[in-house]
């Protein structure tokens, strides 16, 4: 595959195949970020597409100071926060939590008790992440899950270094409370 | 837990602590079972979150995502070109001009309507133009009429 900078330059000239390669190279990473932010709901597919469309529309502003993946993660976080705001408005309007229902895959006939335990753990982890305020969730996703440094997280979210630390610490405390049995299992 | 401690432990897990800080933390870990427990919890939590998100993400989108994204891109539209600073400046002036011009036209119409209303109220003998622009009923001919001028001056 050609280097990323070359693909970006070709896409900026209108080469759609080059843009497609950028989509293919980043779709898994962006899907993971959006899934972490929104939970495994039907909205994820729409938001991920939206991230790449936004990237295409603003491609010429991309100067290559950061990696494409980092630039896309930033868009993904912002688009996810927009989706969470829409979800909140919709919930306030219809007094329903339907949008937040996680859509984990249905168990198959061969599913064992281990599969059920895995599914239950997966559901609890997503519920715990969803219990965090969206801004704290964004910090957890970038710093704790994606492994960006505190400085990078602060830059990507456009917040102060100290704010990242305090949000992360509070989010970590809350996650610990909600996930203690699962974390202990994981340690074991 | 102190926010700085969480950060130090995470950086320890990332391997991004400077060597002297790493040594100091290692020393603290040796002497503090609580801190060791915190480190283990953080490590397990990070691992649990990563594994779970990765597993859920595998089924979170429908197949052929790249195809669907490409179909939604407007084939006639190239990526947006970044404007030069002067283009942005003139663009913003143009955007500003429209509402200002509209407000000006509206103001003129209001004044004209006010003048017409006023002139009909006082039943002044004024032409439409005089009424609209609130002009005094004076023509160039009357302005230079010497008889009239002398009447106002009080001279012959």
Image (cartoon, coloured by chain):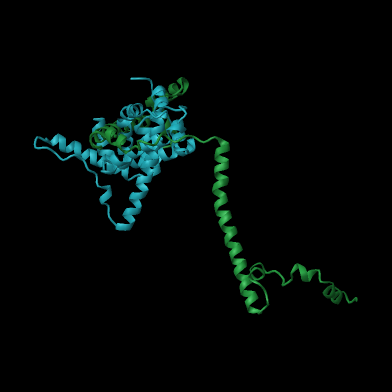
Give the position of the C terminus of chain A as an image quadrant: top left
**In this image, B122 relative to A96: left or right?**
right
- In front: A137, or B48? A137
**In this image, A112 relative to B8: left or right?**
left
Figure label count? 0
Residue B40 appears in the rendering: no
Residue B144 at x, y = what percent?
Answer: 81, 69
Residue B119 at x, y = what percent?
Answer: 65, 75
Q: Quadrant of residue B132?
A: bottom right
Give the position of the N terminus of chain A as an image quadrant: top left
In the image, what residue occupies the spot 30% across and 34% down? Answer: B49
Task: Give the chain ID for the green colour.
Answer: B
Q: Quadrant of residue B79?
A: top left
Q: Quadrant of residue A157?
A: top left
Residue B70 at x, y = what percent?
Answer: 31, 34
In the image, what residue occupies the spot 45% across and 20% down? Answer: B19
Residue B23 at x, y = what percent?
Answer: 44, 21
Q: Residue furthest right?
A: B156
Establish if B56 lies above or below A22: below
Establish if A52 lies above or below B13: below
Residue A92 appears in the rendering: yes
Task: Give the chain ID for the cyan colour.
Answer: A
- In front: A112, or A22? A22
**In this image, A117 relative to A77: left or right?**
left
**In this image, A186 relative to A148: left or right?**
left
């Amino acid at each position: 595959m050609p280097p990323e900078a070359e693909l970006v330059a070709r896409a900026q000239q209108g080469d759609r195949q080059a843009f497609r390669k950028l989509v293919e190279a980043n779709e898994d990473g962006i899907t993971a970020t959006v899934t972490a932010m929104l939970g495994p709901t039907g909205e994820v597919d729409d938001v991920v597409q939206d991230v790449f469309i936004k990237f295409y529309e603003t491609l010429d502003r991309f100067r290559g100071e950061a990696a494409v993946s980092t630039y896309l993660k930033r868009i993904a976080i912002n688009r996810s926060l927009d989706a969470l705001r829409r979800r909140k408005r919709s919930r306030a309007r219809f007094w329903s939590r339907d949008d937040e229902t996680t859509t984990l895959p249905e168990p198959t006939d061969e599913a064992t008790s281990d599969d059920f335990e895995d599914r239950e753990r997966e559901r609890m982890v997503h519920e715990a992440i969803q219990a965090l305020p969206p801004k704290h969730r964004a910090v957890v996703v970038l710093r704790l899950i994606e492994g960006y440094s505190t400085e990078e997280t602060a830059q990507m979210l456009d917040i102060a270094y100290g704010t990242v630390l305090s949000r992360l610490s509070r989010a970590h405390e809350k996650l610990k409370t909600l996930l203690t049995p699962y974390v202990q299992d994981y340690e074991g | 837990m102190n926010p700085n401690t969480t950060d130090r432990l995470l950086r320890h897990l990332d391997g991004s602590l400077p060597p002297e800080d790493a040594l100091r933390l290692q020393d603290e870990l040796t002497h503090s079972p609580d801190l060791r427990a915190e480190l283990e919890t953080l490590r397990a939590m990070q691992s649990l979150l990563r594994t779970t998100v990765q597993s859920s993400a595998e089924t979170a989108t429908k197949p052929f995502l790249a195809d669907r994204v490409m179909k939604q891109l407007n084939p006639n539209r190239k990526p947006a070109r970044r404007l030069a600073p002067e283009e942005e400046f003139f663009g913003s002036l143009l955007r500003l001009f429209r509402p200002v011009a509209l407000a000006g036209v509206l103001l003129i119409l209001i004044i004209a309507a006010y003048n017409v209303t006023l002139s009909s109220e006082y039943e002044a003998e004024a032409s439409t133009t005089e009424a609209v622009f609130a002009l005094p009923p004076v023509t160039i001919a009357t302005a230079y009429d010497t008889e009239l001028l002398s009447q106002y001056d009080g001279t012959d």
